[in-house]
Amino acid sequence: KQVVLLPGDGIGKEVMESAKLVLNTVATEYGHRFAFHEHAIGGDAIDRYGIPLPDDTIKACQQAEAVLLGSVGGKKWDNLPANKRPEKGLLGIRKQLGLFANLRPIKSFPALEHVSPLKQEVISGSDILIIRELTGGLYFGQPSERRENGQAAVDTLYYQRYEIERIIDKAFQSARKRRKHLTSVDKANVLESSRLWREVVEEKRQQYPDVTVDHLLVDAAAMKLVTSPDQFDVMVTENLFGDILSDEASVLTGSLGMLPSASVRSDGVGLYEPVHGSAPDIAGRGMANPIGMILSAAMMLRHSFNMEQEAAEIESAVNDTLNEGYHTADLNREGGKLVGTAEMTEAVIENIT
Amino acid sequence: KQVVLLPGDGIGKEVMESAKLVLNTVATEYGHRFAFHEHAIGGDAIDRYGIPLPDDTIKACQQAEAVLLGSVGGKKWDNLPANKRPEKGLLGIRKQLGLFANLRPIKSFPALEHVSPLKQEVISGSDILIIRELTGGLYFGQPSERRENGQAAVDTLYYQRYEIERIIDKAFQSARKRRKHLTSVDKANVLESSRLWREVVEEKRQQYPDVTVDHLLVDAAAMKLVTSPDQFDVMVTENLFGDILSDEASVLTGSLGMLPSASVRSDGVGLYEPVHGSAPDIAGRGMANPIGMILSAAMMLRHSFNMEQEAAEIESAVNDTLNEGYHTADLNREGGKLVGTAEMTEAVIENIT
Ligand SMILES: CC(C)[C@H](C(=O)O)[C@@H](O)C(=O)O
Ligand SMILES: CC(C)[C@H](C(=O)O)[C@@H](O)C(=O)O
């Protein structure tokens, strides 16, 4: 299996090491072979090649079956012009590979409920999958430019029906594998694109009669994620709403460092990355939480390589490790065993073998 | 003082009665005279005149010094075509009156901290003013239409520099009257309109050197509102981001029914409404929480009529009433005195006189 590794910036490099070790363990246990090809992206690519997404990286990703990404960005590159910033690398690779579906599972780990900013009775039992459309909407719509001599600016929220159909199909299919409840989020009382979105959902639901469907306005969704996160199963929404809501949701459990994500297309090719950022403040100190990256590798095994059992093994090893009391500094846990990136990774590996 | 009342739908009618009683009390105490003119909006206007915002209502509002609005909307009108729905009345009146600044104060009441979905140590001490641009952006940008034979849809995020300047000025001025900390929220790593927004903030801050300024991306803001709401003072953002973030923020204290809002322009004319919706499920049962509406009336006194003392008197009467243990059903409080709309209003009035 050909896997491209894009460690990127900050703690991205450190947690990528953890993912490699875990994947190699799985390879040995199950008799697989993963070939890793490392390439530059983000600030790292800017420093080495002057641009955030070198052609060489694009080409390697296009030939790969899956891509693992650490994280990109950092204060160091914040003052570059917009089209040279590390984030452009991320947006570029999503678009180049056509990764239209971003999957963000958010699950409260019983061992970590105490770190949630929410009261335990509010967060307990929450298990949400947010599916965000990733290659359309305001992120890519044209025109996006200055007008009237620079005295005005315009951005364009544009969706074609097929773009909505494919993400809604993905959402229904995901809901089928879970608790069969789909919440579609839009702003249909204001936006024409949301009205088209809602029409597509209404059409598609005929094909999935076993899935219950709700429509929720984005403002109401932002409320309900906080007041009753346990009432969601799968949530699907357009690109920018998904950016906001999935980040809001990602702090509900209090353990951002634990969360994985997948950006996929229909044929199984995907890019997998932890939700956390590059955390320049703790980079190079060996204290980053590797679990978001490790669980992203598990998502890769499931979605790109159809290795359900191997993915589940990693996930249960992570669970066991937490239950044994291992935690990194970000988890703010008292008692148990406070460890760094390397020891946490080792503890997870112990639980795989 | 000429005040137009737009009770609207559902519990809007009931809580409007409370506002009138409180304002009449203030009038007697302080020797003012308020002339109330009631008009139709939303579903109520649809039922009576076939449209959500009759000309007669627009005209009355244009002649008023301030408008009090109850709430609009309800399932009954949800299946009407988009441009005939109750919400159109709300959007229309904002635009017609040029109310470009929406002010949403969110404050945790010590007597109500236990109803917050957040842990007490997270929410305690939070006191945020969200300022949302209200007449620009995706809500009003053109084109907003179907394309390619209905197979695509487009909406437009458009801002002119002067629209951004006036809201940023409003935000700096508000910050000056508070803790002098302004957080400007945008998505400058993706949107051209956000980059213009950020430029204007950077220019304007020269005029307000006493105010500390932060820029925060909208996804990060959605996170930080949940994890550390007590770190915000004034937050300013564009229309749709403001819609989402102010609603997210409004549930943090757990007492949505308590929250007021003001939509104002530069000359003091304003529209004041509670944050809660029309709540058709409890409408007509005399159990709605009138405090959001009463505090909206207090905001009217402050912003439209410059009656700071009168406004503060209402606010402290509300505080006293809560401390006496009065609460409506939405506050989920044990012990104390569970009361309906009328008794709650009376208790507040008692504390004014
Ligand atoms: C870095 C930024 C452009 C990106 C986005 O907004 O998509 C990030 O916030 C994310 O969610 O992956
Ligand atoms: C009803 C709707 C159009 C409105 C908005 O989005 O502005 C509402 O959500 C609000 O925030 O007042």
Image (cartoon, coloured by chain):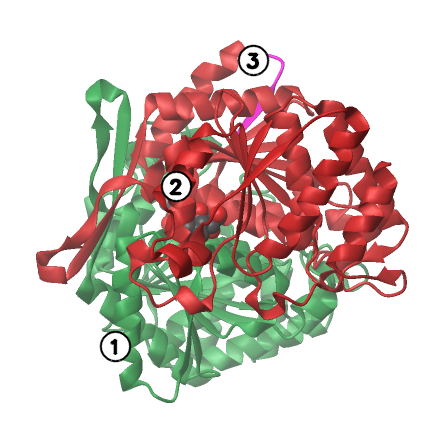
Chain colours: A red, B green
Q: Position of residue B265 (x, y in %)?
A: 26, 67
What is the chain letter for disc 3? A
As helix, strand or loop, the secondary structure at mark 3 comes to loop
- Residue B113, by quadrant, is bottom right
Q: Residue at x 42, y 21 (%)?
A: A165
| Bounds of the magenta segment | A208-214
- Residue A162, by quadrant, is top left
Dot 3 corresponds to which residue? A208
Can you tell me whether the CB of the residue at mark 1 lies under 8 Å from the nearest atom of ligand 1?
no
Q: Nearer the viewer, residue B335 or A59?
A: A59
As helix, strand or loop, the secondary structure at mark 1 comes to helix
Q: Is residue A209 magenta?
A: yes
Residue A56 has which mark? 2
Q: Is residue B103 magenta?
A: no
Q: Residue at x 72, y 24 (%)?
A: A308
Q: Are marks 3 and 1 on the same chain?
A: no
What is the chain letter for disc 2? A
Q: Position of residue A14 (x, y in %)?
A: 64, 56
Dot 1 corresponds to which residue? B203
Q: Earlier in the sequence, mark 2 or mark 3?
A: 2
Report the side of B292 relative to B228 (left or right): left
Discs 3/1, front:
1
Whole-angstrom CA distance, mark 2 to mark 3, is: 42 Å
What is the chain letter for disc 1? B
Report the side of B127 relative to B32 (left or right): right
